[in-house]
Image (cartoon, grey):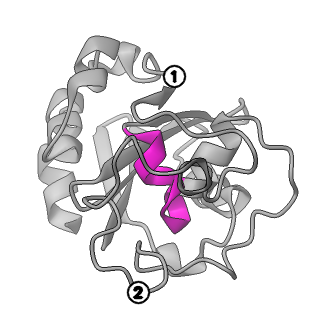
């Protein structure tokens, strides 16, 4: 199960909106959705989590290139939306960003707990699921400094677990608006 929200910075603080992942079929769709939520080309932070398995942060500042962070790339690579992020972070140049072949409930082939069953000893094929030929590391991937100027240090971001999105929102001063869309 996924939870996703957009936090858009405004003159008066943060505004939150529930992000409809049903309409997101590619990373480009996610970026377009984030940019459409921006007020005067200000910062938008897209937050995505899959239960306690992983969380991802996408930061969009106007027309600048988006920045990404994933808490556990190996777990994210095995999920539909996480694989979009890990492909981008690992530099997978394939044009196939479509989610048609992926199971959007976050599991593969009906597995109920794909993340809990994963160990470092799983074969390389499992580690590369959804990321092309380069395996996703079993840990953080991306830019851990993407929220430094907003009050979430890279050290803090790298050590978050559990209810990470709430902790990020608290550091941003956006707890109430995030909880309103949860």
**Which x, y percent locates residue 18?**
35, 68
> Nearer the observer, disc 2 or disc 1?
2
Q: Would you say 178 lies left or right of 26 here? A: left
To which quarter of the image does residue 72 belong?
Answer: top left
Q: Would you say 59 lies left or right of 48 here? A: right
Query: Within the magenta stretch, is there residue 23?
Result: no
**Residue located 42% across and 36% down the image:** 138
Q: Secondary structure at mark 2?
A: loop
**Residue located 58% across and 41% down the image:** 40
Circle 1: is it few (<14), some (14-19), or many (20+) Cα within 10 Å? some
**Which x, y percent locates residue 71?**
37, 37
148 above or below 65?
above
Q: Is residue 35 visible from the viewing direction of this image? A: no
Task: Please name the residue that numbered disc 2 is placed on.
Answer: 110
**Residue located 66% across and 74% down the image:** 99
24 above or below 166?
below
Query: Within the magenta stretch, is there residue 78?
Result: yes
51 above or below 31?
below
In the foreground, 9 or 166: 166
Work out how far the residue at label 2 is from the one at label 1, CA to CA, in angstroms.
32 Å
**Residue located 29% across and 37% down the image:** 12
Q: Secondary structure at mark 1?
A: loop
Q: Is residue 114 visible from the viewing direction of this image? A: yes
Mark 2 and mark 1 in contact? Answer it, CB < 8 Å: no
Labelled disc at residue 143 = 1
In the foreground, 53 or 169: 53
Dominant secondary structure, magenta: helix
What is the span of residues highlighted in magenta in the rendered image?
Answer: 72-82
To which quarter of the image does residue 95 belong?
Answer: bottom right
């Amino acid at each position: 199960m996924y939870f996703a929200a957009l936090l858009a910075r405004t003159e008066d603080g943060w505004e939150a909106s529930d992000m409809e992942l049903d309409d997101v079929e590619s990373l480009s769709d996610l970026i377009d959705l984030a940019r459409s939520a921006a007020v005067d080309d200000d910062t938008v932070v897209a937050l995505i989590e899959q239960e306690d398995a992983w969380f991802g942060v996408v930061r969009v500042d106007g027309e600048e290139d988006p920045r990404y962070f994933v808490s556990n790339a190996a777990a994210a690579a095995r999920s539909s939306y996480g694989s979009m992020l890990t492909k981008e972070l690992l530099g997978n140049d394939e044009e196939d960003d479509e989610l048609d072949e992926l199971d959007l409930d976050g599991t593969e082939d009906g597995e109920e707990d794909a993340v809990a069953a994963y160990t470092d000893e799983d074969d390389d094929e499992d580690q590369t699921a959804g990321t092309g030929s380069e395996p996703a590391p079993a840990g953080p991937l991306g830019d851990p400094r993407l929220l430094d100027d907003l009050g979430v240090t890279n050290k803090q971001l790298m050590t978050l677990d559990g209810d990470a999105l709430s902790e990020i929102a608290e550091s941003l001063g956006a707890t109430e608006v995030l909880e309103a869309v949860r």
